Image (cartoon, rainbow, N blue to C red):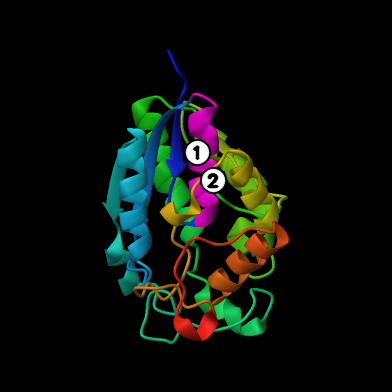
Amino acid sequence: MAEKAVVIYSGGMDSFTILNRAYKEGYDLYALTFDYGQKHRKEIAYASRVCQQLGINHRIIDITAINQLLQSSSLTSDKAIPEGHYEAANMKSTVVPNRNMILLSLAIGYAVDIGANKVFYGAHSGDHAIYPDCRPDFVLAMNKVAKLANYEPVDIVTPYLNSDKAEILADGLSMDLDYSNSWTCYNGRDKACGKCGSCVERLEAFAANNATDPLPYEASCS
């Protein structure tokens, strides 16, 4: 019997790669996608479609109520999404306070409930500059907590913790993944904006791999 594992699956480029990597490694996967009121809700539809195609157990969890407490982020409020690279100071407006701790806590509880001992999530080195809850120290601390919080220890697995977006994409391309099945843009419009930090980093990754991003971009970015 295959080992059960939970994947926090946003529908974005990184979690798409992790989901497929774990799938190819033979895990019995249970994907969780969280609706926390993000502007880029379009990623949820992408996540649902991919899980349906792969036959993966998938749950979309509505936690939009937390927005009553978390209004400082441009991802969950009426603030404009900033443009530029993730290393720019203005990108800090995209931080949703404590988001990954919240999502990991829920995923760990789900893992214990279904008898899974692993939770995969997509922290990577490109996020270290502005997202404290994607840094190695946070992952190490959460892993310790995950082993203490329940009678059944759960491992938090971050395959790309020390990899950048280009390296993640290279791994996905080596698996012949179709990245038109992932959504990255923070704006969530019909086409990707090409200007938000998420789009900029994605486009840089494709350029570094001498590959073409299959997503459609707005005319001003082509």
Main secondary structure along the magenta-highlighted residues: helix
> Considering depth in this image, is 163 or 203 the residue closer to the camera?
203
> Considering depth in this image, is 222 or 140 the residue closer to the camera?
222
Is residue 203 placed above or below 153 in the rendered structure?
A: below
Is residue 106 placed above or below 94 in the rendered structure?
A: above
Which stretch did the figure color magenta?
A: 13-26
Q: Position of residue 188 (x, y in %)?
A: 38, 72
Residue 178 visible, this angle? yes
In the rendered image, which quarter is residue 4 located in? top left
Mark 2 crowd level (few <14, some 14–19, many ≥20, 10 Å Cα): many
> Considering depth in this image, is 105 or 85 the residue closer to the camera?
85
What label does residue 20 carry, if any? 1
Element class at badge 2: helix
Q: Position of residue 2 (x, y in %)?
A: 45, 18
Is residue 12 placed above or below 30 in the rendered structure?
A: below
> Considering depth in this image, is 155 or 51 the residue closer to the camera?
51
Element class at badge 1: helix
Q: Which residue is mark 2?
A: 17
Q: For the point 66% across and 45% down, which residue is it? A: 140
Residue lying at the far top in this picture: please name it.
1
